[in-house]
Structures are given as C-alpha cells and as structure tokens.
Image: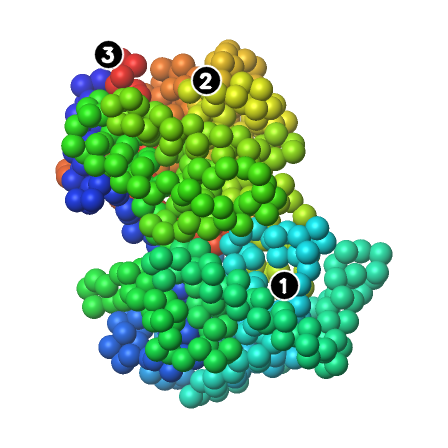
Amino acid sequence: MTARSAQAALELGRDALLRGQDGEGWWKGVLDTNVTMDAEDLLLRHVLGVLDPADVAATGAWIRSQQRDDGTWATFHGGPADLSTTVEGYVALRLAGDAADASHLEKARAFILEHGGVERTRVFTRIWLAICGRWSWDDLPALPPEIMLLPSSMPLNIYDFACWARQTIVPLTVVWSQRLTRPLPFDIDELRSGSLPAPPPTSLRTWPGRLTALDHLLKRYERHRVGAVRRAALARAERWIVQRQEADGSWGGIQPPWVYSMMALHALGYPIDHPVLQAGFQGLERFTVREHGTRRLEACQSPVWDTALAVIALADAGVDSGGPAISRATDWLLEKEIRICGDWSVRRPDLAPGGWAFEFANVHYPDIDDTAEVVLALARVDQEAAGIAEPITRGIDWMVGMQCADGGWGAFDVDNTRSICRQLPFCDFGEVIDPPSADVTAHVVEVLAVLGRSPERRDRGVEWLWRHQEDDGSWFGRWGANHVYGTGAVVPALVAAGVSPDDPRVRRAVTWLTRHQNDDGGWGEDLRSYRDRTWIGRGSSTPSQTGWALLALLAAGERGEPTERGVAYLAKSQRDDGTWDEPQFTGTGFPGDFYINYGLYRQVFPVMALARYTGGER
C-alpha cells in the first residue's frame, strides 16, 4: 500500500470524526450491549406500575429484532446463545403481549428447556423472577442490609466490592429484605425443566463451602432478625442510595444500580412522583435510543472517554489544537473535572480529588482510565494558553495516589482485591472486584512517561507490566477484547517509558501480534477468548482491533509487511463517507459475562493508527 492511499483514508476518517462532534464539544458513540437491558427496563416499569403501551411495543420490536434464527439471544454479536439472556428476552416478549405458543417463543423455550430451564439461570435473572412473583425469595442467596453496618476494615464490607458491584448490592439488600414482589400477569411454568440446580459446596475446608454455610446462617438470622438493627441498616442503605444519585438522575451512570436503586426506594415507600424517582425516570429517557420503530436502552454512556480518544486521534491527524474542534472539546473536558471526594476516598482519605469519570454525570466515581486518557488529550493542547496545567497536575496527582500496593492500577478503586468476594453465593455473574489490569496500568504509565512525572511510580508500573506479560508475549485486556487490546495498550506505554523496541520482551509482543494477523491484513479477537483460551488472538478482523495492533507495532518501530497489510485493511474496509462498520463487540464490561460495542471505537482507533503511520512517513 502507498502512503498516499493511507493519507487519503486518514483524511476521510478525520473528517468523518469531526462531523460527529456535538455543538457543546463532546463526542459520544452509541453504546450497545444485549437485550437484558431492554427486558429489565420493561420489568422495572411493570414493577413500578408505569408501563407505557407505546414503549412496550417499541421495546418488544427491538428485542424481537435481536433474536436469532434458533430462537436465542446472545451477550454479543455472533456469540453463543446465553440461557439467562434468552429467558429474560422471552419473559419481556410475553410482557409485550407475545403468545407463549408463537413460533419465535417456542424456539426460545426449546433452547431454555434443553439447557436446564429457569432453574439454571444466573442469580440475577432469578432475582428478577422473584421480584415478578415467579421465583421464591427463599430460594435465593441471602443479601441482608446489615452489610451496611460493617466497618470498612472488616471483610465483606461494601467497600471490598468494586464500585459497580457495591452500587448494585446496596439497593439489592433493600429489595431482598422487603421481598419486593409485583407478579407478572402470566405464568412461566413452561420454562421450568424440573431439574434442580447443582448443590452448593458444603466442605468447610473451602471458601465456597464456608460461604454457603454463612448463607444458611444469614437465612436463619432473617427469621429471627433484630428489629432495631434491621431498621438502622435500612436507614443507612436508604441514605447511601439517595446521596449517590447523580445530577442526571442515574446511579453511577450505569443500568444495574440505577434500576435496583429505583426499586429499592419504591419498596421503602417512595411514591412514583417522588423527585428522586422522577429524576431517575427522566435520566433513563436520556439513555433511550429510538429508531426505526424500536426502542432500546444504553447500559451506560461514554462521552468523556469518547471525547478524550477523539481529541488524541485528531491531534495525531494534525488537526490544529487551537482550532475550534479541539478547543471546544478541551473546554468541555475541563468542565467535567471532578473536584469532590467519592467512594475512592474511603481507602485514600488524605488524597486530594482530581479526575474524570466515563459518563456525563458520575461525580462519585471518577476512574483512573478516563483520567489518564483525558490528561493525554489535554497534554496535546497549549497548556498555558488553555489554562489547563493545574487540572493536568491534579489528575496526575490523583492517579499517582491511586496506585495499588503491587505497583499496578485498577479502574475505580485502590487495592480492591479481596477475591473472597467472587465466591459469595450471589456472585455468579460479572466481576465484583477491581484489581489492577494491564490496560489501565499501561495508560497511566504512558501519561507519566509522556509528561515526565513521578518516575519512581512510573517505573513501578512498568515492573508490574513485565510481571503480568503472558507466556506467549501478549497482555490480557480487562476493558477491551482482549489480548489484542491489552497488548495494543502496553507496548506504546513501555516504549514511551523508555523501553527499547529491541527489548526481547517487546519483540515477543510484536511476534505475538504478527502471528495473529488475519489473512485479510486485519486483527480480531472473539470475546469467547475470555473463557476459552483457544480463541485468544482469533476472530474476524475489526477496525478497532486492527487499530490497536497497529498502534503497538508502530510504537515498536515496525514498518514492514504486517504493518503495511494492516494499514491496507483499514483503507480498503473504510466506507466512502470515511467511517467504518463494526458490528462486533470489542469492549468489555465483565470478562466472560458482559460486553460492549462502543460506537466510536471503529472511528477513533483507525484514525489514530493511520495518523501515526502517515506521520512516520512524512
């Protein structure tokens, strides 16, 4: 491929990215997940008694449109059928008026029964069924609100859980204690297989066995609970929930704590017209996507993350940092700096705030990854002219203060590594702790290297990355799919930190990437790689994952055939309007369980890669 055609692809991609900027300065791609978001939205509105027929019809149309020919639903595009997702999709369509004997539901039911029925669904699906009167609360793991009374120094207190998990667990303890039940207007006995779930472990020599015994004890306590203690726990939970509602009406800017918090407050007696609940509904409307007669819900929104990545991509592409596009983006990002202490301060009470969150509004939960990318974006701007030196310094100081004891960085908390939390009986879905990861650690290392700050902390981060390199030369990607993402983040960071591209460990990473390049010149990694190692580095080529691989190869000084073929893939897969198609999900919420299709990834990472390629040619 010639540099000229790469330059043409870059210019088309850059212009398409510029067209996507909002007038206020931000970018935000639509964030797609799976139909559990939409099914649970209908169930929430059923529970709260606010189902709107038009919304039900439009949501039902969306859920039907996502059902596959075999009657199932998956957790990501092209992925295997998922039992719990299929059950929730089925129940939602029954709520939308579809008959149980309709052919598309008969297909879904056949799959559900073949795979064990509702009895084999995950705990969170059965919690929804219990709320809807179709599962017994007594057959669910215990979630007593008394957990709120545990001090932060005790094991299994709420701050031992990752921020997304604690935000979900706290309202769920209220819902569980109140046995909130709003029966569906139909039964789902046709989804019961009659098979019993696998018996829980009982050996007290293992943590799962001990935690099963604890669950039995908590259920006995529930029958003889101390009224004054329960009231104190519920009061604390209620205050905790209300205090953490964001300005946009959400809780944490993500769906799970949002819907459970609304149900918890309703269970405690909050009427539907209470300002807190009304703000919650209004916020959900802002997360609603309506198109082509369908309605779906974004599980989250990513404007800060998207805007930071867009600024970096445009700066790489030569867009004037003082021009209107980057200036508007810079002003908007500066407005989103978080200057208050959130849950992170429980473990770092003396650390001054200074960071950015992922969403439009999430002041309680800034995260290290977003802060790193925002600082990298702001560093591309004339710091004195834009008046951003102090926010950059505050962001760096906060990130440095959030370094974990082992030298790495997690996403939201520090030293959030109590693995026993993963083994609690109700924790059968999604990661519930926030240990350091290669991708977040790499982004912080890159910031510290590029800006020349905290060399000792940077070097500890580099050592962490070396310790966590896989035997095959790659790095695991916590927040993106998967080893291509991790490796694409780590190699540029190491080189920025002064590691020679000729370092044997960097060469192993380069070799891993080149060995996993597809015949069409691109890279792809299927999300099944999180559970099945035979999928690592394998999958259909995507623009975003090809961009990640190229960023690593270019940082390592690779200008040979693999790089040329990767650039050629981006150029030939680009549409005439400068955009790229990417139906595949390449973002990760919970490895192995919950995945994301970021609408802007397909644009920003190809533009970054093409810009760095053509910049190296000039």
At horizontal 44% and vertical 77% (from top left) the residue drawn is: 270
Helix, strand or loop status at disc 2: loop
At horizontal 72% and vertical 81% (from top left) the residue drawn is: 223
Quarter of the rendering occupied by the C terminus: top left
Q: Amino acid at mark 1?
A: Met
| Quarter-of-image position of residue 425 | bottom right
Vertical position of residue 301 compared to residue 288: above or below = above
Q: According to the image, label 2 marks what residue?
A: 452
| Position of residue 503 in the picture relative to residue 88 (left or right) | right
Q: Amino acid at mark 2?
A: Gly
Question: Alpha carbon of mark 3 to alpha carbon of mark 1: how far?
Answer: 60 Å
Residue nearest the observer in this picture, 284 or 581: 284
At horizontal 46% and vertical 42% (from top left) the residue drawn is: 367
Question: Alpha carbon of mark 2 to alpha carbon of mark 1: how far?
Answer: 42 Å
- Give the image location of residue 286, x and y in percent: 28, 61
- Give the image location of residue 339, x and y in percent: 42, 42
| Position of residue 245 in the picture relative to residue 608 (left or right) | right
At horizontal 44% and vertical 32% (from top left) the residue drawn is: 394
**Res 60 label:** none
